[in-house]
Amino acid sequence: MPTTLHLCLAEYDAMVLRGAFDVLDRKVELFRGELIEMNPAGPLHDYLITYLNNWSVRNCDPARTWITSQTGLDLPVQVSRPEPDLMWLRKGNYRHAHPQAADVQLAIEVAYSSLDYDLEEKRRLYAEAEILEYWIVNASANCIYVFTEPQAGDYLTRRIHRSGETLAPQISPQACLDLQDLFESN
């Protein structure tokens, strides 16, 4: 009977270092020990990430926060290395190791075709890893789902913010994101 091949983070790293994925014309992430193929990004997805990246850089405290875009996040207990579209990270040296959950101040995923996956699977993954705050930017409905207070494998607090409202991350309450500008300036 065939079985699914599960990888640990060390095996995944070895495959990356040996160029195992260099010939693929698609993006993959390690999710709970399995390789998951990610959908290619369209222009709206890329635009929203660029907007949020620029907003983040302008509004974070560079003495304590670094902004990264589509970089690996090590979650060893969950045997996963997702690549959130955007992360606010505790300032540190990530030259020799990917950041871990304790380093994440805010994780953001931009969802168009991946909304169900981001709302269910990634939400639970990030909650289990105790990522303190997780946003999902719903590109088709012009809203942002905000999840905070991870506990027992899920988030206790869930809110939806819509165009016309403002939103700020817990780590930086003065960093107001204007959702109307985010969604309607594109």
Image: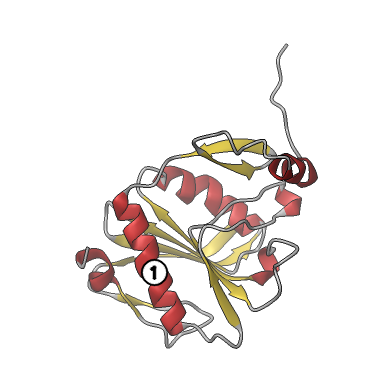
Q: Quadrant of residue 94?
A: bottom right
Residue at left 70%, top 39%?
33
- For the view shown, which residue lies furthest in the top direction? 1
Taking the spot 27% from the left edge, 75% from the top edge, the residue there is 165
Image quarter hosting the C terminus: bottom left
Q: Residue at x 20, y 66 (%)?
A: 184
Q: What is the crowding at mark 1: few (fewer than 14 residues within 10 Å), some, or many (at least 20)?
A: many
Residue 110, placed above or below residue 59: above
The residue lying toward the viewer, choosing from 25 and 108, is 25
Residue type (three-letter) at the residue carrying disc 1: Leu
Q: How is the image coloured?
A: secondary structure
Q: Secondary structure at mark 1?
A: helix
Q: From where the camera sits, is residue 186 visible?
A: yes
Q: Return the residue nearer the eye: 22 or 3.
A: 22
Q: Which residue is mark 1?
A: 52
Query: Is residue 144 in view from this perspective?
Result: no
Of 25 and 32, nearer the camera is 25
- Would residue 35 be found to the left or right of residue 56 on screen? right
With respect to residue 96, does 76 lie above or below? above
What is the number of callouts on the image?
1
Task: Choose top left, top right, bottom left or bottom right for residue 121.
Answer: top right
* Residue 18 left/right relative to 155: right
Residue 91 position, x and y percent, is: 64, 79
Q: Nearer the viewer, residue 34 or 116?
A: 34
The percent position of residue 16, horizontal first and vertical second, equals 69, 43
Task: State the quadrant of the N terminus.
Answer: top right
User: x, y percentage for residue 134?
Assistant: 51, 64
The percent coordinates of residue 73 (x first, y second) are 64, 58
Outermost residue to the right:
10
